[in-house]
Image (cartoon, rainbow, N blue to C red):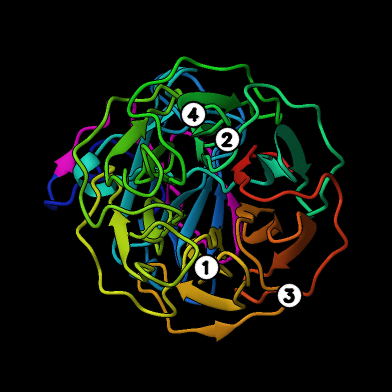
Amino acid sequence: MSGIVQNNILRSSGTIAVSAAGLNWVDTIITGSTATVEAGNGYWINTTSNTCTITLPSSAESGDQIVLIDYARTWGTNKIIIDSNGLNFQGNADTYTVEYETDGQSVNIVYSDATKGWLPLEDDVTALEPSPPPTQKAIFGFGKAGSSKVATTNLVNSSGVVASDTSGVGTASDQKGAASYGSDKGIFGYGDDGSGKTNITNKVSNSGVVASNTSGVGSARFGLAACSYGSDKAIFGYGSTGGGSGKVSITNLISNSGVAATDTTGVGTARFYLTATSFGGDKGIFGFGTTGIGGSANGVTGITNIVSNQGVVASDTTGVGQARFKPSAAIYGGDKATFLYGTLNESDGVSTQNLVSNVGVVASNNTATGTARFEHAGAGYGGDKAIFGFGSAGDLSMTNLVSNTGVVASDVSGVGTGRGGLSACGFSLSA
């Protein structure tokens, strides 16, 4: 039917919620891949044949209401995507992805104000945490070139092109961790500055500018790893507090404003020279490393530890793939990850790749293209791809791009100072 319906907002219980201003139900069933909707209306969305992007009004007043109904109970197969058209949705800018993908779902939203924007009126029906868009750019930073520690950085644009050196900011050091936080920024932390282990951090803005040192929090250490979790926070974990005998499994959480927390009691096997990456949209995984002193295969592990979307580290998962240390890892495909390269003896690299599914399952060995190496770094870029770069032995500056299906490309001639023991992370939501 068409016309003004005063009390016709569906709840999950099947009861009727009062709409004081009334609601006009549009009797034309929407079947296209796009639709523009207006406040004060209810719409039937039929996604039997395709997904549908719903564009909300570009301006709204407090109390404006829109209802969307899964007409054919097919949103679980073909979802709807809400484009908030410049306005906020649940307090998030419209660069965030808002999707509904549950069969039979109804979406009842009301505009609040410029701060929170559109809000679901019925959270028991439409509870949803929007996913931030993936990072578009990356940064390689710090490391050791020859016998010298450096603070040099190299930006990577959304097409995977590496820029020349940027003069270092912060204390020159290597064997640091790095991760994205706050959805669009990055952070380098901890490491070895040549005179001892550090716990200082350096934030990276969403335009790729590295900040000066932030006073350290937590145990100073090197050879640790870091990754994002919860879509906007990060975690540093494991490492060594003193040579080969000081291996720890402690972690330090990083808030969505880049503040490092004090030590959390470690879970899993204490080790160093491991790596970490995010996966699944809001989780992370630490993997590989060594419990020995290094220089040989003694103590080298293939174990992994998953990080929940709350930053909780799980106990050891029995290793899959070639045990090794000093590999690197990065997210690709939007929700999957890959471990790549590494070493058994700090002299020769291995070409091993292990893919990680979007639920954190590590696949068996795959032989990857490119120069086998270790002490390199990896990060996501371009929304759904990854890049690995630099490394030892020989202070390499080459890079290898990874497609959104996890395929490693051949070497790209290096840009910037060749070095090993560096770190990398993603930043920026803008291409």
Residue at the spot of label 1? 338
Q: Is residue 381 visible?
A: yes
Kind of residue at disc 1? Thr
Label count reads: 4
**Image quadrant in which the C terminus is located:** top right
Give coordinates of residue 271: x percent, y percent.
33, 54
Q: Which is nearer the N-term, disc 2 or disc 3?
A: 2
Q: What residue span does the magenta drawing correspond to? A: 16-43
Observer-nearest of 431 and 39: 431
Q: Residue 42 colored magenta?
A: yes
| Residue 249, horizontal then vertical, whole percent | 27, 46
Tag 4's secondary structure?
Answer: loop
Q: Residue at x 55, y 58 (%)?
A: 330
Residue nearest the viewer, comparing 155 with 198? 198
Mark whose residue sits in front, 3 or 1: 3
Task: Say whether disc 3 or disc 1 marks the residue closer to the N-terminus.
Answer: 1
Residue 252 is situated, as x and y percent measured from the top left of the image, at 33, 34
Instruction: State the residue at coordinates (29%, 47%).
Output: 126
Query: What is the CA distance from the residue labelled 3 to the residue labelled 1?
Result: 15 Å
Which of pointers 4 and 1 lies earlier in the amino acid sequence?
A: 4
Residue that numbered label 3 is attached to: 370
Residue shown at 85% from the left, 43% from the top? 163
Looking at the image, is mark 4 or mark 2 nearer the viewer?
4
Image quarter of the N terminus? bottom left
- Say whether residue 180 is left or right of residue 319: right
**Residue 20 image offset from top left, x and y in percent:** 27, 25
